[in-house]
Image (cartoon, rainbow, N blue to C red):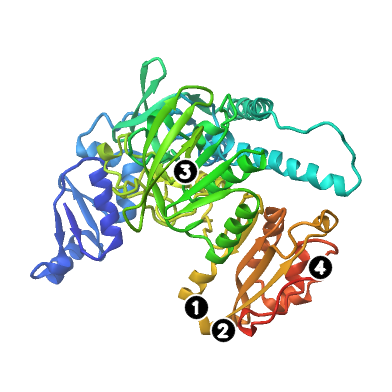
Amino acid sequence: MIFSKTFCPYCNKVKELFRSLRVDYYALELDVTENGDSIQQVLAELTNQRTVPNVFVNGTHIGGCDATYQAYKDGALQKLLGDNQITEPYEYDLIIIGGGSGGLACSKEAASLGKKVMVLDYVVPTPLGTSWGLGGTCVNVGCIPKKLMHQAALLGQALQDSRKYGWQYEEQVKHNWETMVEAVQNYIGSLNWGYRVSLREKSVTYLNSYGEFVEPHKIKATNRKGQVTYHTAETFVLATGERPRYPGIPGDKEFCITSDDLFSLPYCPGKTLVVGASYVALECAGFLAGLGLDVTVMVRSILLRGFDQEMAEKVGAYMETHGVKFIRKFVPVQVEQLEQGMPGRLKVTAKSTEGSETLEEEYNTVLLAIGRDACTRNIGLQTIGVKINEKNGKVPVNDVEQTNVPYVYAIGDILEGKLELTPVAIQAGRLLAQRLYGGSSKKCDYINVPTTVFTPLEYGSCGYPEEKAIDEYGQQNLEVYHTLFWPLEWTVADRDNNTCYAKVICNKQDNNRVVGLHVLGPNAGEVTQGFAAAIKCGLTKELLDETIGIHPTCAEVFTTMDITKSSGQDITQKGC
């Protein structure tokens, strides 16, 4: 019996606890019950407790929210409920489902705090049969191989520039895809092994098995051979990440690849169609083109949704001038195989998003990069009552990454409304373990997180895109400083003058505090990381102006900006 009030968050928390234990309860809502105040007064006299929730189990008074949770933690609540199974000691203090960056960080931190921890990690093979080792998306099929292949493409550009710098070579330079893939996969393999060694050193139990909840506090683990084991824990962390989405058209899973397949592809993809305009799509299209391949990007609507759109269009324009073709406002409706091979030949039929026009074209490879889906639908969350967003599978959590079921937490890309970035998952995982087991109260700060899109011309950002800053503060309250610039390294090669671009967005009503910083240029990630720390400390335009730049660098342009967008002045550069 729970004496409750409909608006009380602590009452709701207690109800969630009983729901997660699949225990039936009756809640008397005193704020909507006749004589509710009188009932509460009588309860106060009987129990010496004036607040709600006021919980009774089988006639025994438990108390409020904190007392109920304490009874749950020490097993007294389960005994009162008559559930002898639950009172048995848990096998682990913490089980983490997902061995990516966030899950591994959380597991090692919890283990270092003296807790018994298990990590389950299982990669469901792609439709083409691709799978990988421990470490998650970033290490195996994301950030790491992407940056390495981006570097391979940059080296090709550097070779072209080198002639202007006096380097002479007669032999024809060409790229070998197989050599690159082997080197990248060897490095990833060393990381996989390193993660396993690290878990063993921390005494974290690792199972290469698929985890699925079968009842509260209990999971089923199924390995590749179909062998099943069961494990219990006091606390669980969901860190399952996401996988690429398929459009659901004829031929998508049979003949197309995704980023999950690309980085270990045993053959050069040849003429490639990249479907999508996400950062994954543009990064892959960029390095494939940089390696000398014929690349086309098919875009449904806008580039880099969620990013600053002025910067996004500049990213696309640079790619276009460097050989990447764009088909705008079209989506594929069918992919047919014309010829098998490595690569084979495919025919793509696409339809306009603005009319009935269709087009057909042949490619060797079709790479789908239209978004990612959270891996939460087939791990038994419905069995224990964890709520997810049914549309996208994302998990809503509170400000301490706790789901609606009190003993289940979630971190990383599966969180509703949070950034899908590896360093964010790592930070959230470590801090969660410290709060659970180290007495910390520090929460993950999801504001002003820097990031970089590793397109041929890199795009780094921290804070608000210009469009969102306008929505948040109003255009009249903002001042945008901007400039084009020409990296010194590019001047001798005589290429791409007035292509790189930087801007800072300042809130005039808050001492010209920088609320958005954006840069398009070489090494944008290195530039953005430094300024991100300053923004977190409350960077203002005055402080930027007072900072002495390092010359000659690209980053120094942020210390010399004096032209505002509102002035309409020319921002082209004519020298260093």
At 58% from the left edge and 46% from the top edge, which residue is drawn? 283
Label 2 to label 1: alpha-carbon separation: 9 Å
Q: Secondary structure at mark 4?
A: loop
Question: Amino acid type of disc 2?
Answer: Gln
Compared across the picture, whether 282 is left or right of 252 comes to right
Contact, CB < 8 Å: mark 3 with mark 2?
no
Is tag 3's residue or tag 2's residue first in the polypeptide sequence? 3
Is tag 1's residue or tag 3's residue first in the polypeptide sequence? 3
Residue in front for this viewpoint, 209 or 51: 209
Q: Nearer the viewer, mark 1 or mark 3?
A: 3
* Residue receiving disc 1: 473
Could you say where residue 477 lies in the image, as x and y percent from the top left? 54, 83
Q: Is residue 255 above or below residue 481?
A: above
* Residue receiving disc 4: 549
* Residue receiving disc 3: 369
Q: Is residue 212 visible?
A: yes
Contact, CB < 8 Å: mark 2 with mark 1?
yes
* Residue receiving disc 2: 509
Which quadrant of the view contains residue 177?
top right
Work out which quarter of the rendered image holds the C terminus and state it.
bottom right
Q: Is residue 320 above or below residue 24?
A: below
Residue in front for this viewpoint, 533 or 353: 353
In the image as oriented, which residue stretches furthest toward the left?
34
At 58% from the left edge and 36% from the top edge, which residue is drawn? 139
Contact, CB < 8 Å: mark 4 with mark 2?
no
Label 3 to label 2: alpha-carbon separation: 40 Å
Could you say where residue 80 lies in the image, as x and y percent from the top left? 22, 40
